[in-house]
């Protein structure tokens, strides 16, 4: 558990799943609508986020502010797999705290490099990652889970070498 100014970073709890789902749904559509295959947009309805949030709560770290989930990050192995911040908390520094936490978790798991996927048209996210020392390592197709199997999504792979010093 980490406290930074007005945000508390902690392991997500099952009771956080509805808030995670709401933030994930809104943030995902902000960053992906019109930038990924329509088949994937159609598969990402509110119920899909509620189901996935409940299933993935153990993978999530949340940032809490005044008892409210302000954002979350999910790390799987060396990947920052999901990271979203509630719209009214954007610009507060919480995304940077969550990204730092993800890097810490990846480094603690023994990985020297972290990676994440960003859709090319999500310029706001790409600028954010670049400001935090991540670099664009090139294009690849991310296999997103769809209703009828994986959906290839053109993405950019961002990487960051993780130093052993903090």
Image (tube, rainbow, N blue to C red):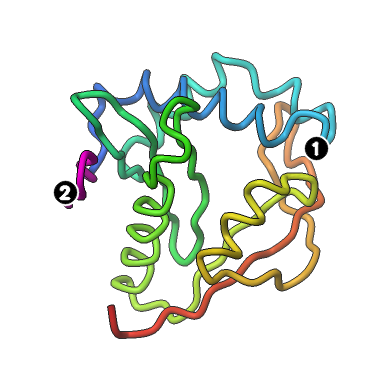
Residue 128 disc label: none
Q: Is residue 127 above or below residue 122?
A: below
Q: Residue 78 at what x, y percent from top left?
A: 47, 66
* Residue occupied by mark 1: 36
Mark 2 surroundings: few (<14), some (14-19) or many (≥20) residues within 10 A: few
Which percent across, then down, holds residue 113? 49, 77
| 165 relative to 53 in the view: left or right | left
Report the span colored magenta.
1-9
What SS does tag 1 mark? loop
Residue at image coords 56%, 21%: 48
Q: Quadrant of the C terminus?
A: bottom left
| Residue where numbered disc 2 is placed | 3
Q: Position of residue 89 (x, y in %)?
A: 41, 31
At 37% across and 21% down in the image, what residue appears?
Answer: 19
Identify which residue is drawn at 71% across, 26% down: 147
**Tag 2 secondary structure:** strand
- Residue 7 sits above or below residue 20 on the image: below
Looking at marks 2 and 1 on the same chain, the residue that comes earlier in the sequence is marked by 2
Q: Looking at this rendering, what residue extends furthest in the bottom direction?
A: 164
The image quadrant that residue 75 belongs to is bottom left
Please give the name of the residue rendered at 35% of the width and 42% of the height, measured from the top-left corner: 60
Residue 63: in magenta span: no
Q: Residues within 10 Å of mark 1 (few under 14, many from 20)?
A: some
Spatial separation of the CA atoms under disc 2 and disc 1:
36 Å
- Residue 53: where, in percent of width, then height? 43, 29
Q: Nearer the viewer, residue 114 or 125?
A: 125
Q: Nearer the viewer, residue 48 or 130?
A: 130
User: Could you tell me what secondary structure mostly forms the magenta stretch?
Assistant: strand
């Amino acid at each position: 558990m980490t406290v930074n100014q007005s945000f508390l970073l902690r392991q997500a709890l099952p009771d956080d799943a509805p808030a995670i789902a709401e933030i994930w749904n809104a943030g995902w559509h902000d960053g992906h609508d019109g930038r990924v295959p329509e088949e994937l947009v159609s598969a990402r309805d509110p119920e899909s986020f509620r189901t996935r949030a409940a299933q993935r709560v153990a993978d999530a770290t949340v940032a809490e502010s005044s008892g409210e989930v302000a954002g979350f990050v999910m790390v799987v192995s060396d990947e920052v797999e999901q990271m979203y911040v509630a719209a009214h908390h954007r610009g507060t520094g919480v995304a940077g705290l969550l990204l730092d936490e993800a890097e810490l978790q990846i480094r603690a798991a023994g990985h020297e490099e972290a990676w994440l996927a960003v859709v090319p048209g999500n310029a706001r996210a790409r600028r954010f990652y670049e400001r935090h020392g991540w670099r664009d390592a090139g294009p690849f197709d991310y296999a997103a889970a769809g209703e009828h199997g994986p959906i290839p999504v053109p993405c950019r792979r961002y990487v960051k070498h993780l130093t052993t010093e903090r």
